[in-house]
Amino acid sequence: MVPTRDLLAPLDTFERRHTGSAAAEVAAMLQAIGQPSVAALADAAVPADIRLPRPLNLPAASGESAALAELRSIAGLNQVYRSFIGQGYYDCATPGVIQRTILENPGWYTAYTPYQAEISQGRLEALLNFQTVVTDLTGMQIANASMLDEGTAAAEAMMLAHRVKLGDSHEASVFFVSDRCHPQTIDIVRTRAQPLGVTVVTGDHRTYTFAGRVFGVLVQYPDTTGSIHDFAAFFEQAHAAGALCVVATDLLALTLLRAPGEFGADVAVGSAQRFGVPMGFGGPHAGFLATKDEFKRQMPGRLVGVSKDVHGNPAMRLALGTREQHIRRDKATSNICTAQVLLAVMASMYAVYHGPEGLKRIAERTRRLTSLLATALRSAGATINAEPVFDTLTVGNVAAVRVHAAAAAKRINLRVVDDYTVALSLDEVTTLEEVQTLLACFSESAALDLSSDLRPLSAEFGRSTPFLTASVFNRYHTEHEMLRYIKRLEAKDLSLCHSMISLGSCTMKLNATSEMLPVTWAEFGKLHPFAPAEQTRGYARLFADLETWLSEITGFAAVSLQPNAGSQGEYAGLLVIRAYHQSRGEGHRHICLIPTSAHGTNPASAAMCNFKVVPVACDARGNIDVADLKAKAAEHSANLAALMVTYPSTHGVFETAIREICATIHAHGGQVYMDGANMNAQVGLTSPGHIGADVCHLNLHKTFCIPHGGGGPGMGPIGVAPQLVPFLPGHPVVPTRAASPISDLKSQIGAVSAAPFGSASILVISWMYIRMMGPDGLTRATQFALLNANYVAQRLEKYFPVLYRGGHGLVAHECILEFRPWKKHGLEVEDVAKRLMDYGYHAPTMSFPVPGTLMIEPTESETKAELDRFCDALISIHGEMAAVASGESDKLNNPLKHAPHTAAAVCATDWPHPYSRETAAFPDAPTRAAKFWPAVGRVDNVYGDRNLVCSCVGMEAYAEAPKA
Ligand SMILES: *Cc1c(COP(=O)(O)O)cnc(C)c1O
């Protein structure tokens, strides 16, 4: 267990901080489940034929301070130049109060996706603010929270337009993309369009003639060169041709510019990065997508809406869930699951802190500086792109090589265009001195003319409508008010700061502080994703380490770090499989077998690749029905593209037939995609590559310790077997596999994320985790994840049956508890989930993969004490349920049905319940020592979907309205 520690060894070894229990506790748990050791438990749980033959080949564990020092030296290989490259990424000032109390605060970053609305009102409110910022500034009616980045948001907008205009039809169709969109956006759209048979036509919108079935157009406003166009006439043409109009835009510019909704846009997309979120070499940032009310049911991604709780008070929750993959599977509006919540929260708080006037000042200042520079450059003989402009200039008639060299000498990056042209974007933190320095890079003699006027924007360009009029954006402009607002919201949300969050499949393990600290180091945070390679050697080293380590852990030949979430890894991995088949002249293979127990993202991702999903049955023990699999593989042999399989299964079992399953698929010419969400049960014991899979995504925000951020960010890199390496995602701006021969680059699929290495800055978290755990620590973490799950299963099965077990009666790293028998007493699994809140706990995963169940994944990071406290709570709830079943408690008026209990309800004069207030709020001793109060009573989901309100203006109106 805990290795014998030499007295001279480092004192800050990490494994004992990450992997919970003390030796005596471990012994007690082992005894409870009847296993002699954690190693023996792993031997019994994991089928022998898939066990790794040797230990992981990774660097030995490093202490916390030594790992941080090593990463510091890697960070030192990055050069922090001042980047004016623009192209979708801008330097900005993260207000200190937001950096410290949100970005660096586990109270915000360790929360889960807000499915349990009653204990998530804080981030739901912040997300509602985000949606309001986006709808106000874009002039659209409804916005989601959030997209993964600007490029994928544009691709999702294309898909939305395709659904609206063409439905399920796959007739030949065209999507027009202005050639003045950012190159990475164009590439992502092309990649996304290709499998669907959509032709992407790029060109100049001013000369484009509509031909063929054009279902949508995409333009950029301001465009990538910096010019701002009036799209009103073009959009009229597009609408006349039966197309939807998509605008990729910039929130800061929109504080001054006419809103897209006012000149005919149907969808507006973009990135909220420059609202206070560091560039981070590409991410994470919140993308956004806003549209008209009539298209709301076609919207991708998460949407927060206002509803009411049982007491009639306004309460928020995720709305229109029926669009999503959990329910709609391959018919879902997108495959997005993990989004960019933490970054959307930051961006919304930036808007709250600055308010409409503050934002306008930032924008006006930026525009003023840009105009000064433009005037001076023009008088120095350069040409500038067409007026009006906001923050970006494309400067022509210059000796670009010389300009870049002069800039580099001053540690400044400009955007490379061609030999005679240089582009640059100014930003919030640009100073007058910097503008002077920039000018000097172009001309030694030119000078700024500070007396020159800033021409007002003419009516077709200037903004005339107000924005951010809701009181939340006009109240908290002092730091004290801001600090308290953030803290007030934080206090409404249950996070890992309070108690274990045992969400099956989601792996809510420790997000250690030492892993998090480097995220905000300037050497990682301040880099532009398109900065020259010589400045980003630290990142290159970080990526190389991670690619090597993750390849070793997955048993694969190579890893792509580009996908921004598990869902995006699935999409990327399936595209890679598709490209592989095509390269062998087997492009007709389009059947994707998916077990019925699969996560909803699987079929949704398959649909994005235009694969046809054929479900495979599961047997009574929760395993894939191998006979059914074999029959379907044989039936579709000629067209079989892939199987998507989760291992261990979503039922929490190591299926013994997994090798046979992989072999069957290969025998019929298919490839095996392994959903790696359950890697926390594999690391060091077995691996996807060893088992026989061909590609697998890793949710770094599950197994590799990136926090969930309240619903994102995440990272979903994919590992692939040798035959798939040539097809890994490329990028139009930065080569993603510099070492590969050119032929490799040609075969790459296009970009799947806007940034070449996804949300690069959070990769430091997984690097730290692997570095501090070492090969033995990682393997033991897996063993302890198995131990904790089996211990919980053993303690609870007397009360709630464990649905599935594998060999030796053991579960894997999670277990599913059965609640359906209680239905006949009127008790639903949801009542249990809500009652757990009164005990200070977040419910385990509810009704996935089996309706009417809870799936518990304790992870290795919880101690026996915490596991026991959680089990005690569920056992106590069992007693309450039994009282209802026996008739001792009222069928309707009982603590389960009225859970969760708010402080207001418990303190109210009127107490209309037969059980005591004490039972309601303080059902066990731990709640007395530290009570977490749910902010609202049970939320009415249906009401909110019938009366959809998705902005804080609606929320405020609701709060002020008299109650019925
Ligand atoms: C979490 C999860 C996914 C989706 O991953 P995201 O990172 O949320 O996109 C897919 N499959 C399974 C089994 C999961 O648990």
Image (cartoon, helix red, strand yellow):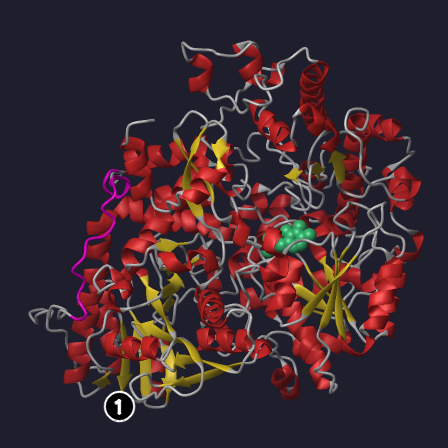
In the picture, measured across the screen, residue 330 lies left or right of residue 913, that is: right
Q: Is residue 226 visible?
A: no
> Measured along the vertical axis of the image, is residue 260 above or below residue 42?
below
Residue named by callout 1: 397
Number of numbered discs on residues: 1
Q: Which residue is drawn at 65% across and 46% down?
A: 506
Residue 25: x, y in percent? 79, 26
Residue 785: x, y in percent? 76, 41
Image quadrant for the N terminus? top right
Image quadrant for the C terminus? top left
Q: Which residue is drawn at 67% across and 58% down?
A: 698
Assess whether residue 381 is covered by the magenta stretch: no
The foreground one among 332 and 336 is 332
> Measured along the vertical axis of the image, is residue 199 above or below residue 114?
below
Instruction: Identify the main secondary structure in magenta.
Output: loop
Residue stretch rendered in magenta on the structure: 460-475
The three-letter amino acid code for the residue at tag 1 is: Asn
Q: Can residue 240 be seen in this view?
A: yes
Assess whether residue 462 is covered by the magenta stretch: yes
